[in-house]
Amino acid sequence: MTKSSQLSGVNERQACSVGLGFEECSATVTSIGDTELTIAKPFVKEHEVVETRGWSFYEFNVTDQDFQVVVNVAEEEDSACGEASGYFEVFLKYGQPPGWHYGQWDFRQAYQYYQTEQDKDQEVKFDAQTEGFQTGTWFAGVEGDDHSDCKYTITINKFECPLNCSGRGTCVHASNGTRSCDCQQGFFGRECANEALALAYNKPVTKAEALFEYDYYSLPEVASAALQNTVEVKVQASFSSADGYSDWVSARPELLLLKGDNAIEPTTANYTYKHILEVQNTVYEIGLGPSQLKEGLWRIAIYNPMRLYQIGYKLTAVKLAHCLNDCSGHGSCDDNGTCQCNSNWAGGDCSVNQAGGGGCQEGSHKSTAMPGKHATGYSTCACSGSTCEYTDSNTQVACDEGYTIQGSQKVGNKYVGGTCVKSSGGKSGTSAVGVFLWVLFSILLSFTVSGALLWLQQAGFLSMTWENIRNRLTRGRGALDESLYHELSMDTGF
């Protein structure tokens, strides 16, 4: 049995462990001192050789400052081991050298379904959150091939956080002693080792058939402007596989979609929406309508449950924006569902004509100065369908201050024509005394007209022609005021 002691430097000795197949102390143990393996300093030894059917061991200490240990054994290029269905593997055991039988090791490499034949690296890792983790003396054992010697490089790393966050994040020490990674933007997973490829809208991604478990993508972040309008997003996927996924295989690839933050990724146990890809070369779709679309980060995963089978796939994200009234034909709809109006058009649906500098709403007026005529003209906004324009001619005219209209004629219910002439005497405008006198004059005039009409009726004038009335008035009954004559001619139709 190997003796455990405080290690310093690197030294070798023979291992004599009963029951492990090397009782004759033929296996070599390399003791790695505490100064040769720290969190800041990995242990690396190149050109190591393990003989045919032999073992090589490495002894090292784990302290309470060490959160994770990773042992990597990489076969070197000029090594021929493992080519004839032999074995070349690494095992870890606490307190004594490991063997390959169950119960003789604590950790070994997890089976890699998607490991290729050319990938001859062996990696074993364990940490403080793994069952079986202990502080104290550990042994790594490299088992040789059945047919030839193996040449390799061994690397042992200690980390204060999972894989030191892969250099893509910050290690966070919690008060309860746990360690976690705060990943940089774009990276995620426990070790910040996962990266999502950016998926652009309407640009399909095609992947050739390969071995993998998860492939990750991210949608463009949903802007708040898109949530205020009618926008929908569709994620479409199809797959193909020449290796398998026949009818007798119940498992199928999956399309996963997750609304979350930067630190999490979609998995079969953690997703917002999922669609199983049942049939090869068939497009399946997850649609996000306006009520389902949320602002922020959305991640996509293609999951291959049969990791021994190669699959290929095609993935597309489609964004559809619907604008109000299709922007009334006076603008374009952007991908957030907002109208980008053409020149001189405004409003949420580009229906307001701003030609001439003012908004054109049906019934509104636009003023035009008429300096030569001492007046201001007003044209009216009229709409035909979705087009609203001001009329070419002025529908109303107002004289400038200090001018009054003269010479207008009444046509129907409107007065037309006329000229703005300068008002006679004093300042323009109406005083309170003037208003009072005008009201008093109007009342007296109404009584005068009423009395005159009654007198004319009693005198029989209303049954005569106008010439007879003029002659009758001229012969001695007096002449009517000219303004009264004008009023009578308009009201009586003469």
Image (cartoon, helix red, strand yellow):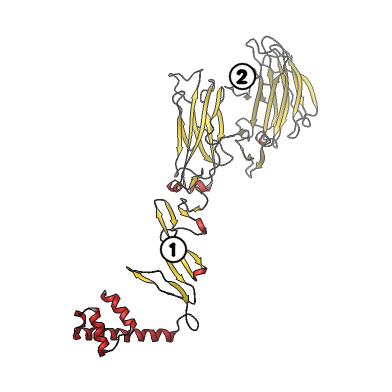
Judging depth in this view, the residue of 409 and 87 nearest the camera is: 409
Q: Which quadrant holds residue 114?
A: top right
Tag count: 2
Using the image, determine if residue 12 lies above or below residue 345.
above
Query: How crowded is the residue under tag 1: few (<14 C-alpha within 10 Å), some, or many (20+)?
Result: some
The kind of secondary structure element at disc 2 is loop
Do we see residue 250 in this rendering? Answer: yes
Mark nearer the viewer, 1 or 2: 1
Instruction: For the N terminus, give its image quadrant.
Output: top right
Q: Residue furthest bottom?
A: 476
Q: Is residue 49 above or below residue 321?
A: above
Counting from the top left corner in percent of width and height, residue 65 is at 70, 37
Say whether residue 269 is visible. no
Q: Amino acid at mark 1?
A: Asn
Reply above or below: 130 against 228: above
Q: Label 2 amino acid?
A: Thr
Residue wearing tag 1: 394
Work out whether mark 1 precedes mark 2 in sequence or the reverse, and give the earlier one.
2
Question: Considering the image in quadrants, where does the C terminus appear?
Answer: bottom left
Residues under labels 1 and 2: Cα distance? 85 Å
Disc 1 to disc 2: CB gap under 8 Å:
no
Mark 2 burial class by Cα count in 10 Å: few <14, some 14-19, many 20+? few
Taking the spot 42% from the left edge, 47% from the top edge, the residue there is: 325
Give me the residue at 47% from left, 52% from top.
Answer: 348
Q: Secondary structure at mark 1?
A: loop
Mark 2 highlights which residue? 116
In the image: residue 382, left or right of residue 244:
left
